Amino acid sequence: MIGTTQAEDAVRAALRRKLPVPQAIEDASKMWQVVIDAGHRSAPPRPTPETIPATPAELRQLITEQAEAKRHAESVRSVASDYLEPVAENYRRLVRDAVPGWILSLTPEFNTLVKVLTGQAKKLPEDLRVEALDWNNPKISAAWEKAESAAHQLDQLVSDRKDMARAIGGDGGRDNELYAVAKFPDPTEQAVFDNVLLNEVAPVMHGWRELKGQPVSRWLHLARSEHVQLVLATPGEVRDRAAAVQRWRDAIAAMQAASGRNGAVVAVRQALAA
């Protein structure tokens, strides 16, 4: 179950990106805080020798007042616990409704940064490993500096998008960070038999994983690939993209397990239709 913490993280991410947060969400957040504060309502402190009043009458009055204060604090905490889940669910629902629009609003900035990155990728050598670059070449260092700025901003944007996506269940499992920003071609029967996944798509994915410790090279690797579209995904699209790649793998496995060309064609068609 998605908790209130994930909703709060999503709202903070939206505010960092200067995206509009509906007044209803702000009000729901404040209501959640009211419930939390009420749930921590303190009872009067226990008496000490220093706090005992001077006369029996004063003590009698103090005991009566503190008994009422204690009953009130207990009642407030009890009622607050009744409101805890309804108020939290209302807040989470409002945030869930807002997340798709927030993520969509990130697309123009994402596309602009990708355009910058793609432009600089053309100015850099084929080998994008940091240790392989000629840092004495001013053209290379200048292109790298601009690419580094764009990559850093992309990492921040994607991180905020991830915080938003968590509020509605997240993006799924393995390679979800890649599928959040990259769309691979859908598998076709001909592409399966032409080994497009193995020869063209898989190297892009392997490069992304291998360059995990070099974020600038990692982004440049994606930006210059002809076999991937850099398109920011909604949370649902991440799972769809992952499923499309899995259909590639399933179709290849079916082809390899089939007997003869005709059997392979039938097996691939069935796998792609599943």
Image (cartoon, rainbow, N blue to C red):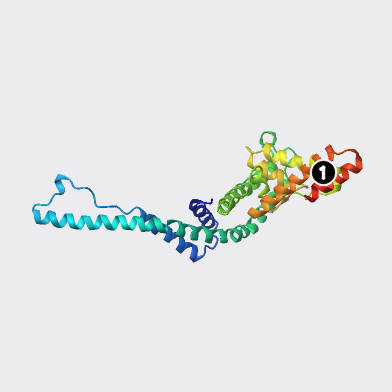
Query: What residue is rendered at 67% in x and 38% in y?
Result: 209
Please provide percent x and percent y for residue 130: 66, 36
Q: Farthest bottom residue?
A: 23
Please provide percent x and percent y for residue 111: 67, 55
Please provide percent x and percent y for residue 48: 17, 45
The residue closer to the viewer here, 76 or 157, is 76
Query: What residue is rendered at 74% in x and 45% in y?
Result: 246
Does residue 14 appear in this view?
yes
Query: What residue is rendered at 57% in x and 61% in y?
Result: 97
Residue 105 placement, left or right of 205: left
Circle 1 — which element? helix
Q: Quadrant of residue 64?
A: bottom left
Q: Quadrant of residue 84?
A: bottom left
Up/down of 234 relative to 134, above or below:
below
Please provide percent x and percent y for residue 166: 57, 51
Q: Farthest top residue?
A: 131
Does residue 116 appear in this view?
no
Residue 35 placement, left or right of 118: left
Up/down of 83 relative to 124, above or below:
below
Residue 58 placement, left or right of 178: left
The residue closer to the viewer here, 108 or 144, is 108
Which residue type does callout 1 highlight? Val
Q: Which residue is disc 1 drawn over?
A: 196
Residue 51 placement, left or right of 119: left
